[in-house]
Amino acid sequence: MTNVAVVGIGQTKFGEQWRSSLRDLAVDAGCQAISDSRIDPKMIEALFVGNMAGGGFSGQEHVAALVADNLGLNPIPATRCEGACASGALSFRQAYMAIKSGHHDCVMALGVEKMNDVKGDLALTTLMGAGDAEWEGLHGLTFTGLYALMAQRHMKDFGTTREQMAMVSVNNHKNGKNNPLAQFRYDITIEQVLKSTLIADPLRVLDCSPITDGSAAVVLVSDKLAKQFELPVWVLGSAQGSDTLALHDRKSLTEMWATKEAAKRAYEQAKIVPEKIDIAEVHDCFSINEIIAIEDLGFCKKGDGGRFVEQGKITIGGERPVNTQGGLKACGHPVGATGIRQICDITRVIRGSAFNNIKGVKNGLALNVGGSGATATVNILGADI
Amino acid sequence: MMHSTPMFWRSNKNRYRLIGTKCIKCGSLGFPPKKCVCGGETGPFEFSGNGKVVSYTIIRAAPRGFEAPYAVGIIQLDEGPMVTGQIVSEFSEIDFDKRVKVVFRKFREMSDGLNVYGFKFEIVA
C-alpha cells in the first residue's frame, strides 16, 4: 500500500472572528493549504470536511458542498465528517484512507467551525449535542459538566489535585503566547485559574477551552506525488475508536477506552512505543482531559497524569512535551477545526517552522476526542517513513 | 439540542416510573432502555430507584431552559446500571457513595410552553 504525506497546511487565526463567516474561514484555510503545498488545485481529487454543528451554529448544513463550491473545487467529491469535537481528525483520517486505499493521490482535509454567531447559552446548548441528548442533555448536564464528573472521580480515585489541573492550563497558555494564530496569547498563573469563575465544580472557566471561530486545512498526497515536495511529513499511523455515547454507560469515568484502542492501533501501525513519541498534541477541551489523555496514551501510568504534569514533564524541554503550540486552551477550540489544527502544528514542528520551535523533533502524535470520549482518533506523523 | 415535547413523551414510562429493560436470555438489565448486546429479546423492568452517587457536579453555567445552579450526578442504581440525573438535595449534602432515592420532579418548560416531568434523585440520610 502507498504511504501518505502531508504536503500543505493552512490555518486561519483562531478567535472571535466577527468579520468572517463559516465560508470565509474555510476558504482562507483551504487557499493557504493549497499555496503552502504549491500544488495546482486541479490536482485535488477529493475533499473531506470536518464540521460538528454548522446547523446549530450557523444554520448551515451541507458544509462540504459549501466548502468545495467556494474553494472552486467542484465537481470533485466533497464529504462532511462529523464526530463532535473529533470531526477534524475524522476528516483527516478519511482523506488518509482515500489515498492509502489507492483510490486517490491528492486529497484535502479541512476542518471548520463558526461558533460565535450564536449567543453563549445557545452555543452551550449546541455543544451538548455531543453527549446523549435524551439521557444526559435533558437532565441539564452540560459539556463542562460531563468533564467535571470525570474530574471529580479522578481526584477522588487518584488524588489528582486542583493545582495539577490548573498547571495544564498554565502550560498551554505559556506555549500559546508565541503562537500568532492562537486565541489567547498571554500567561496565566495557577492562582488565576483557581480563582476564576466556577462553571461546573471543580472546573473553572480557565480550565475550559473557549468558544472559537476558525478553520484549518491540509493537503495529503500519495508516495507517487510526494517525491516532488521538499518536506513531506508522513502519516505513520492513523486509528480511531468508539465508546458509549453516554458517560454513565462506561466501565470507567476516568479513562477513555476509545483513546486507548485508537492509540494501541496507531502505535502498532507506526511501529513506535509511547516512550519514543517526541511531541503530542492532545485534546485539552478541559484541563482534566489533558491529564486523562496523557495516561490513556501511555505516557505514564493510569492515575499518575496529575503528577506527570506537576513534575513539568509536559513542558517544552520536558520528557514528553504536550500541546507545544498552546493546545485547545490557548489556541481556541473551533470544534470541527481542532483535529486539523493539531496536524498543522505537528507538521510545523517537524518542518522546523513552528511558532515554538523544538529542535530534533522527528515525530508527533495527535489525539482528537469527540464528546465525552465516544469518539477518539490518534494520528502519528513523522519526518521519515 | 432542541428538545421537543414528543421526544419527552416517547420516554414517559422510563422517566415517570424508571422502567428500563431486562434481557430474557442473559438477564442483564438496561437503563436507559437498550437492546442487549447478547442478542436476546428484552422486556420491561422497573427499577427500585435506590442507588448511590458515583460522581457529581454543580452546574453553574446553564444551557437554554435550565436555571443554574443545580446538581447533576451519575447514580449507580442498586440493580447495577448507572444513570445521569439531577440531585435535588442541598449541595453540601451531596458526596461520593451517598445513598439516593428517586423523586418525581419538574424537569423544565419546553420551548412550546409545556412543562415536562421525570426522575431526579434525593440524598437519603
Image (tube, coloured by chain):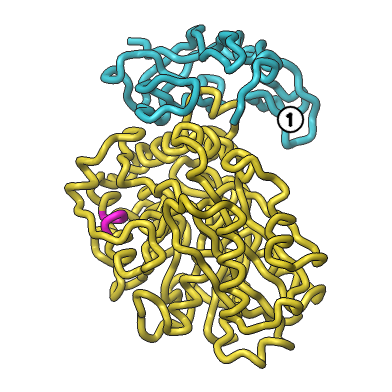
Farthest residue, direction front? A19
Write down the residue under mark 1.
B35
Amino acid bearing label 1: Lys
Location of residue A369 in the rendering, given as x and y in whole percent from the top left corner = 53, 52
Task: Locate residue A293: give its quadrant.
Answer: bottom left
Q: Which residues are magenta?
A: A167-171
Considering the whole magenta stretch, tell me its main secondary structure.
helix
Where is residue A175? Give x, y as percent: 31, 66
Residue at position x 73%, y 25% in the image: B23
Crowding at label 1, few (<14), some or many (≥20) Cα neighbours within 10 Å?
Answer: some
Q: Is residue A43 left or right of residue B97?
A: right
Q: Along the horizontal axis of the image, is A313 left or right of B70?
A: left
Q: Is residue A180 visible?
A: yes
Q: Quadrant of residue A135?
A: top right
* Element marked by disc 1: loop
Q: Does the magenta portion include B118?
A: no
Residue name at image x 40 percent, y 48 percent: A210
Q: Is residue A178 above or below residue A115?
A: below
Q: Colour of chain B?
A: cyan
Between A213 and A81, the residue placed more toward the observer is A213
Apparent colour of chain A = yellow
| Horizontal relation, residue B96 to residue A248: left or right | left
